[in-house]
Image (cartoon, grey):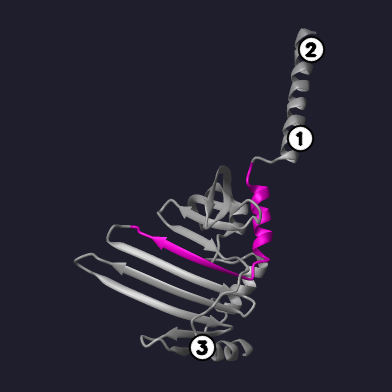
Amino acid sequence: MDNRRWFWVGACLLAAGAIFWGVGQAVGPSNGDTEFQRTLEAMKQVKSFRGTYIESAKSTQHSERLWEVDCNRVIVHQQSHDAQTDADSPFEMKQDELLVGDHVYARDRDGSWENTGDAGPTYSAKWYCDNLAQGTVRELLPDILTMTRHAVIGKGDKKTVNGVRCREWNFVMRSAVNNEQGSVCIGLDDHLPYEMTTENGSHYSYSDYNRPIHFEAPEAVLQAASSN
């Protein structure tokens, strides 16, 4: 009889604990699943933004990227700078590209833009903007969709990035195609990503969401390519 009594007492305590946990989750979930779903939906509404990337894997190597996106005009501007100061094999490479619709323009040393042809079915401005609207954008913004499916997410501290208050969410992603960990700082009000860092020393920064983007290129070229 005593054993049965303690069994029912234990079962009641477990049930009460489960109810308490469920209410707590409903009122304020502690994991990042809900927040990342909000971020995914917020990213689908983005029409323009700027992003930067810096990586210094070694003291002799350095990589930088800048991209400016305006999906209202279907334009993506990309700049890159890679350098290696190793005495045995030093090099430096710079690239400046303007993706307009399905076209690709490369900036020459004299500052002019040369039409180098079509981008193809992927990695064109149209492809980037279509993926952004679907929430499947890669490279330009954090891959939130994959994180919601494969990452373990933990809440971090609040901080200010690019003048915006955001909260860091630490993630560990383990999948067949991705093995990565780091953090994403998500805006407290708009739920958009403002910073991402990874364990390999990469740092991403995002700003100017849905603000006008000015491109240093002839307006006539931009309009003609956009109409095509």
Q: Quadrant of the N terminus?
A: top right
> As displayed, is residue 160 above or below residue 103?
above
Q: CA distance from mark 3 to mark 2?
A: 83 Å
Asked if one can make out residue 174 in the rendered structure from this viewpoint, the answer is: no
Circle 3 residue: 218
Looking at the rendering, the stretch of residues picked out in magenta corresponds to 31-57
Structural crowding at the residue carrying mark 3, measured as other residues with C-alpha within 10 Å and reported as few (<14), some (14–19) or many (≥20): few
Q: Nearer the viewer, mark 3 or mark 1?
A: 3
The disc label shown at residue 23, or none: 1
Which three-letter amino acid code belongs to the residue tagged 2?
Arg
On whether residue 35 falls in the magenta region, the answer is: yes
Residue pictured at 62% horizontal, 65% vertical: 136
Along the line of sight, which residue is nearer the eye, 133 or 3?
A: 133
Determine the secondary structure under disc 2. helix
- Measured as percent of width and height from the top left, residue 111 is found at 40, 86
Residue 70: quarter of image? bottom right
Q: Quadrant of the C terminus?
A: bottom right
Residue pictured at 31% horizontal, 63% vertical: 61
Going by the image, does 41 lie left or right of 146?
right
Asked if one can make out residue 121 in the rendered structure from this viewpoint, the answer is: yes
Residue pictured at 41% horizontal, 62% vertical: 54
The disc label shown at residue 5, or none: 2
